Image (cartoon, grey):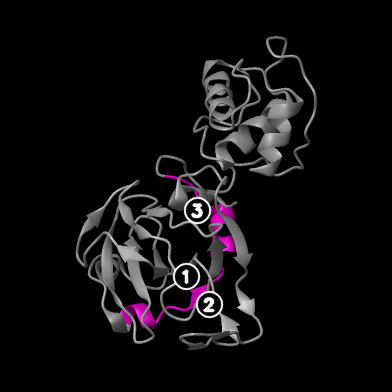
Amino acid sequence: MSNVSNLIFADGGKKHYKSSPYGPRKSISTSGGKTSSFHNGTDYATNGVKLPQYAIEDGYVFASAKASDGANYVWVIYPRIKAAMLHYHLDSRSVKAGQKVVKGTRLGYTGMTGKATGIHLHLGHKNLGSLSASRINNMTWDALRSCSYSDPEAYAKNYRPKGIKSKTGNPYLRPNYPLSRSKYECGKIKSGDDGVRWLQFELQRTQFYTGRIDGFYGPKTEAAVRSFQKAKGLSVDGKAYNKTFDALEAA
């Protein structure tokens, strides 16, 4: 799953999956009526389970209400990344409009209220880059409507948690040349090894590593490997061999 959806569900990608992408699609008949022929978001199904959903970082709840089609929804504004995210079809809401949130604040539970055929999250995303900081921090419906929806999955590929910069050439980002998965023996790695860069990038993508992508298998990288192995039910030895590589690629 994506950098963003893994944070929203906090399940390491184990219990949710992408069920419907952003963009044109056939209209679907539901008990609440027909859906639009253009999907303004990405759907994440949860195998019929009502999972909790969480804020991905510091922000505030712009709206928490029930739509005209009966769907429970929450709009969260994230000023740092200039983004607004819509959580739709919720079974229940855990926050109120105006409430401040931080990473891990529970927003509600996945449901199928409104025009839905199964339990899932419809995640909408709007880029607020055209708005001033003042308007983002004091959002209005007119300001929000002036910003277009965009593909949450495309946005998620470039999302960086707080503390990780995103300027071109920053050492925290993926190098501007192809990274390849390569075998290496832990503890016998030269600084700058490309296989370690790949490992560090994948650990960063899955939210387990916040250090520099420098190709050095030091204590921070090993600690991130151990944390990832524990989260995925692998043998926790700090050695990134094939099983760990496979799990990273699948995450």
Q: CA distance from mark 3 to mark 1?
A: 12 Å
| Residue 165 position (above or below residue 92) | above
| Residue 160 position (above or below residue 233) | below
- Asked which quadrant contains residue 22, the reply is bottom right
Label 2–label 3 contact, CB within 8 A? no
The x, y position of residue 44, in whole percent, is: 55, 62
> The magenta stretch spans which residues?
143-161
Crowd rating for badge 1 (residues with CA inside 10 Å; few <14, some 14–19, many 20+) = many
The x, y position of residue 106, in whole percent, is: 32, 52
Quadrant for the C terminus in the image: top right
List the residue tagged with mark 2: 40
List the residue tagged with mark 1: 124
Along the viewing direction, whichever of 251 and 185 lies nearer the viewer: 251
Tell me if residue 39 can be seen.
yes
Along the viewing direction, whichever of 20 and 61 lies nearer the viewer: 20
Label 1–label 2 contact, CB within 8 A? yes
Q: Which mark is residue 71?
A: none
Q: CA distance from mark 1 to mark 2?
A: 6 Å
Say which residue appears at 58% left-offset and 48% top-offset.
168
Amino acid carrying label 2: it is: Asn
The x, y position of residue 235, in whole percent, is: 63, 20
Q: Which mark is residue 4?
A: 3
| Element on which disc 1 rests | strand
Q: CA distance from mark 2 to mark 3?
A: 17 Å
